[in-house]
Image (cartoon, rainbow, N blue to C red):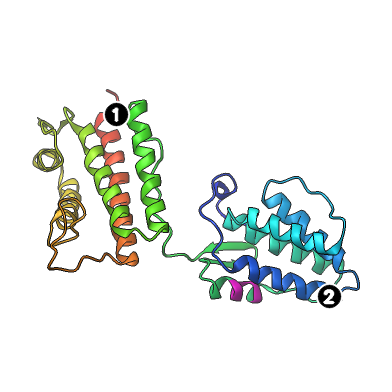
Amino acid sequence: MLKFDGDWRFDSPGEIAPGVVGGFFNLISKIAGQFPNRYGIMEHFKQLFARAADQDYSRSSSLSWAESDLRDYMNRAGNNAPRFIEAFYDACEALRQQSPEITVPAAARINRVLFENEAGYEVVPPDLICRNPQAPVPVPVRAPSLRQQAQEAFERSLAASEKALADGNSRQAVSELLWLMESFSTIFGGVAIGEGTVEGKYFNRIVGDLKRHGGANFKRVLTWIEALHGYLSSPTGGGVLHGADLTGDLVIEPNEARLYCNLIRSYITYLMAEHERLTRGL
């Protein structure tokens, strides 16, 4: 088994990149070509991918069905990229030990498929390393001090933003998270900080109150948050809240959208931690 973040076994960090399923299946076909019984190799890989897909394994009635069923198991396992890669790696390593006369892909050959398809992972035995710069900054799903209805809206907005990024809807993805940061800031209303209390009910007033009464580091981060919020809100900036300047650049490129989303997600996480600190014991 490969070593990677244990949470990935329960919550997928993302699907395997398009093209990896076909790339690995081609390698399996080349492995099978070294055996007089291709059917047995297909069944061997089927068992590992069925386990990765949390499916019950059953033998196929023929070679053609075994190949088709293997494809199906691989597609299902592809919903969780780390477990998918681990299934292929473990199947190869098992064959290496059982039949040392047979050549199976080394880590470098596996990594070539991953690299060519921009999968964002690298096998460095015994570890699986995430090399994906596009991975989203994690935000705790359960936000503090939110009632159930607000919590559901919070989770929906996080999910909607990530889906919009995956679908190529950059402006929508950024807008969802910017709205979420604005909305989450309202939980600071009435919170005592320093020698004052947060009186504001809207984002700009709330941030202003927090800056007046918070410490130096808190003020610095809030200044960055204000700057990003102001730029993305402005028609001559990101234009994601108040409309874009039709005479300017209307396009937010995917890499820019991911940068903005990751910055906003990191700020939301920071605000969560600060709210918990300020309200601890209340």
Does the magenta segment cover residue 112? yes
Range shown magenta: 109-113
Is 215 on the left or on the right of 114, as rendered? left
The reply to whether residue 14 is visible in this rendering is: yes
> Outermost residue, top direction?
282
Q: Which residue is mark 1?
A: 280
| Quarter of the figure that contains the C terminus | top left
Q: How many marks?
A: 2
Q: Position of residue 5 (x, y in %)?
A: 55, 52
Question: In terms of secondary structure, what is the magenta stretch mainly?
Answer: helix
- For label 1, the crowd category at 10 Å Cα-Cα, with few meaning under 14, some 14 to 19 and many 20 or more, is few
| Quarter of the figure that contains the N terminus | bottom right
Q: Which residue is mark 2?
A: 102
Please give the name of the residue rendered at 33% of the width and 26% of the height, measured from the top-left corner. Answer: 147
Q: Secondary structure at mark 1?
A: loop
Above or below — where is 271 with respect to 230?
Answer: above
